[in-house]
Amino acid sequence: MKTVQDIYNIEKEIKHFDSKPQYGAYISTNNCSFDIFINDMPVIKHMDTSGSGLSGSYFPLNWDIAKKGSQKITIKLRPGFNQNANILNETLQGNSEVQIKIVKSSTNKDGSFGEEQEVKNYFTPQKKIQNKQVATYDGLKTFEDHFTFNADVPYNINTLETANVLLTKDEQALKTLEREVVAKYNEIRNIYMKGTKDELANLNYNKEKRVAQQLYFSDEEIKNRWDNDYQFRTDPNLEFFDLKPVENYKMTFYANGKIVCLEKINNEKSALWGGFKKKDKDVVTTTYISLYLYRPQNSSKLEIY
């Protein structure tokens, strides 16, 4: 069984490289709801409920870059919010658009980032009508597009290469899988509510090791991530911690059917959620615990990715 101390010692278990390229995406959007994925894993899923968009927001991508070579970005657009009518548009509009700029930077030996280099600059397609540029999908209810870019990372993560495909057209098999996924979510919820942080570390060790490798974490960064990102009811700085029952969810698949998760129906965020209050804060913070599951080859159990 892995413990919190094993999490702290992950830096000794991963490979270290002189070159540490980091990839990210600057995303700008207008008048649309949208989902953006890398290698069929979600980068951002946004439902426009106010007419707002993104303006050059940065999203790291190394999390879902498993190895050197071609990486696939998928863009899915849906109608945005009509501020005049105070409702969602029924279709995409001429000014519904997305720009994604992929950049690469390297981490220097002192831990600082080197200068960014543009790798790809994507715009959703437009056409000219009466001397005005409008989206080619103007009037459609949905639009999907793809592009690729090459990533030159030094590591090779084969976790999903050897994982089983969970998505199937067999309805009975899906129902069986759903019961298994719900049971796993409840097992993890129970550890948060009644178990120890060592038990939580045992479940998440492989995930933390993978992320530390992909993001080239130092010993201090690994420790800080675990201490700060995994809020737990026994943490001395917490006054209150609670997770809601797993309910009102839908089962969703990613990574070409090899990843499964439960998402809340109303907002498509993790169905493992709740809140906590720090002692020095006046409000309860809502937290959604991202939980992606996969089944390793020749295994009967689901594990955290």
Image (tube, grey):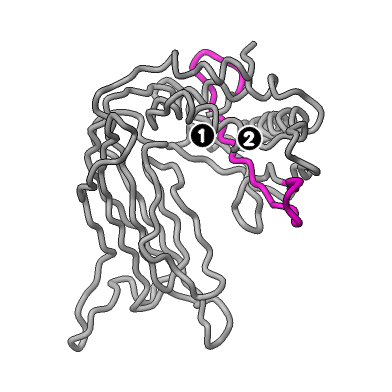
Q: Quadrant of residue 110?
A: top left
Quadrant placement of the N terminus: top right
- Residue 276 shows in this picture: no
Residue 48 appears in the rendering: yes
Q: Which residue is mark 2?
A: 230
Q: Secondary structure at mark 1?
A: strand
Tag 2–tag 1 contact (CB < 8 Å): no
Q: Which residue is mark 1?
A: 259
Specify few, some or many for label 2: CA neighbours under 10 Å numbering under 14, 14-19, or 20 or more.
some
Which of the two marks, 2 or 1, is nearer to us in this view?
A: 2
Number of residues whose C-alpha sits closer than 10 Å to that of mark 1, classed few (under 14), some (14–19) or many (20 or more): many
269 versus 5 height, above or below = below
The amino acid on which the numbered mark 2 sits, given as a three-letter code, is: Tyr
* Residue 177 belongs to the span the image colors magenta: no
User: x, y (%) of residue 94?
Assistant: 34, 78
Who is closer to the viewer here, 249 or 55?
55
Left or right: residue 229 compared with residue 97: right
Q: Earlier in the sequence, mark 2 or mark 1?
A: 2
Give residue 97's position: percent from left, percent from top.
Answer: 34, 69
